Amino acid sequence: MTQAPDLPADIVTPDPETAAGYRIPDWDAVAGPAADFRTFWEDRAKELEWYEPWDTVLDDSDAPFYKWFTGGKVNIVHNAVDRWLVGPTRNKLALIWVSEDGKETRTFSYYSLNREVMTWANILKAMGVGKGDRVTIYLPRIPEIMFAMLACAKLGAVHSVVFAGFSSDALKERILDSESRLVITADGSWVNGKVFELKKIVDEAVRHAPTVENVVVVKRTGTEVAIDPLRDHWFGDLETLPIAKGQCATEVLDAEDPLYILYTSGSTGRPKAILHTHGGYMVGTYTTLKYVFDIRDEDRWWCTADPGWVTGHSYLVYGPLLNGATTFMFEGGPTYPYPNRWWQLIEYYGINILYTAPTAIRSLMRFGEAWPNRHDLSSLRLLGSVGEPINPEAWHWYHRVIGKGRCPIMDTWWQTETGSFQITSVPSMPLKPGSGGKPFFGQEAEVLNEKGEPVPDGQEGFLVLKNPWPAMMRTLYQDPERYVSTYWSTYPGKYLTGDSARKDADGYFWIIGRTDDVIKVSGHRLGTAEVESAFVSHPAVAEAAAIGLPHEVKGNMIHAYVVLRVGYAPSEDLEDELRQHISQHLSPIAKPDHIEFVDALPKTRSGKIMRRVLRARALGLPEGDTSTMDDD
Ligand code: PRX
């Protein structure tokens, strides 16, 4: 670990009015290490409705396979949808959706959200989907993705959402691993005014995934698609069938029954299937959103993430609905057709809280202040950041230009694995731009050296979490050994985050980045192994190594080293072809910024690529210990 430079001393104190209106004014009194996290979480669970109460708040008898609220009967959909159907909340807007071109708006009250979810659940049920069955969802950012997720949960089925920008290879792998019998998709999606043909990708993936019996297709772009009459069904046809109509009861489940799996990149090999459950995940996402963003009844909350990632799961779909808020979903991105798209939407819909990623802020910053300044952003009360460290320059721009200096920025650190925020700011605390804040209530974090000892304040080390929390993943689906070895074996009893960080003398944590072979590109998580295997699936490539290098807007960019097979010569055309290949075989997000053709890669004697050495070379830094390098 390196000795990092001094931490910035910049502190932004909360606006007294915001702080006074905040529901938890004294953060330290509740969040200090003395607070009993079991009682804290039990009290929060009591704020939600359970069919039957739990016997035990936390069962740690088989740690690290922790169980929460055991004996409790629940369904997350009961708290996200059903309970709002009684009284005036039934007519409150649950979802406002706007199309990429801005020409279409669809709104759903809690009442109509329930009708949609019941229709979807009736259809899934008629297709034989029941408790424990996995369903792959490959949909764009349209209301149907929310309906499909909630319908699965309502039936006790396990959704596996795959970001609709992943390639057919990546989709196939995820369908096969989860053994899904049903895939839900759309004809296409809109990406910057162009159609991205989703159904074609599904056809290709399903050709190699024999478990799939049915494909439900939502019409979005009107693109012509091939329909296999025995396997493919237009949702528009299904919803007119008598079977789709009528009430559908929400399944009574055990608190520990699985809610979803979500694939995420790890250091090596195949993506990991993170498993979350109904009870604990519900309590965790509900509580963190309520306390960190102080969500209120009248709020319009906008999380810009795609439901294909965990941020979309926890804070676009489940968290806001569990709080009975109005969640806003926009199909498009921040700069199409113009860089004022988001500011226009905030003004028109009166958004109160905006939760987004630093990469989006940095890309919008480049277009200057004139774009946001054309709009009335006075409805905003709070801002949020997630996915990667936010550099102080972007923080200040966000705070000054978007929040007009009045809106505190909640930097929330968490992971697919954690399900909910772990290290975060709250509106009443002094903010340190660039710092992720402090551990959330009930959590304690530490920065350790290789021997497992806490490092002195200000020094870089491995970030670990000390206490279990309700929304934590329960295991890696079908790979419990990897769950233990990846997260719980380095420092027994402590959860290894995979990040490096520093803690300052005031107890604020400063996240530096990943310590493993995971690269965060524009806040999206990619594994070097996935990128490298996409490279070697090209006939010209013998070997490849991918590393992350700093990038002004994306945070990190992919830089790849490629060894060509005999008979192929480096050329610009081949470089372009390889870039396209990665885009098609993994995802456009994974497209490398640079490809360097080399004769050999630095490896250890046991044949492992030394990415650390490649990074050091690329950055012009000392190569460190190379004693294990094979220099034959
Ligand atoms: O490196 C950290 C970074 O994102 C990783 C988790 O990625 P993923 O599972 O895709 O979840 C992203 C959204 C929760 C972490 O290990 N990360 C996430 N939030 C922050 C962050 N780094 C710094 N500051 C954050 N607020």
Image: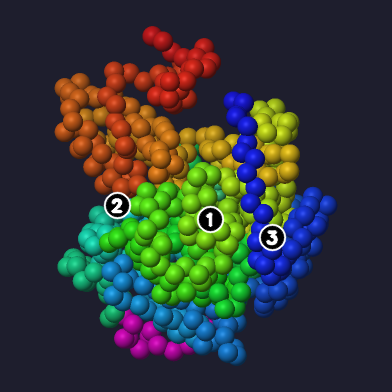
Q: Which residue is mark 3?
A: 428
The quadrant holding residue 8 is top right
Q: Amino acid at mark 1?
A: His
In 3D space, how far apart are the residues under numbered discs 1 and 2 (Cα atoms)? 40 Å
In terms of secondary structure, what is the magenta stretch mainly?
Answer: loop
The location of residue 355, given as percent across then percent down, is 51, 60
Q: Mark 3 packing: few (<14 Cα in 10 Å), some, or many (20+)?
A: many
Say the numbered circle drawn on residue 168.
Answer: 2
Vertical side of 464 occupied by 228: above or below: below
Question: Is residue 251 shown to the viewer in this render?
Answer: no
Residue furthest top as drawn:
632
Highlighted range, magenta: 238-250
Q: Which residue is mark 1?
A: 399
The location of residue 529, given as percent across then percent down, is 41, 36
Q: Secondary structure at mark 2?
A: helix
The location of residue 256, given as percent across then percent down, is 63, 63
Indicate whether residue 107 is drawn in magenta.
no
Q: Amino acid at mark 2?
A: Ser
Mark 1 vs 3, N-terminal side: 1
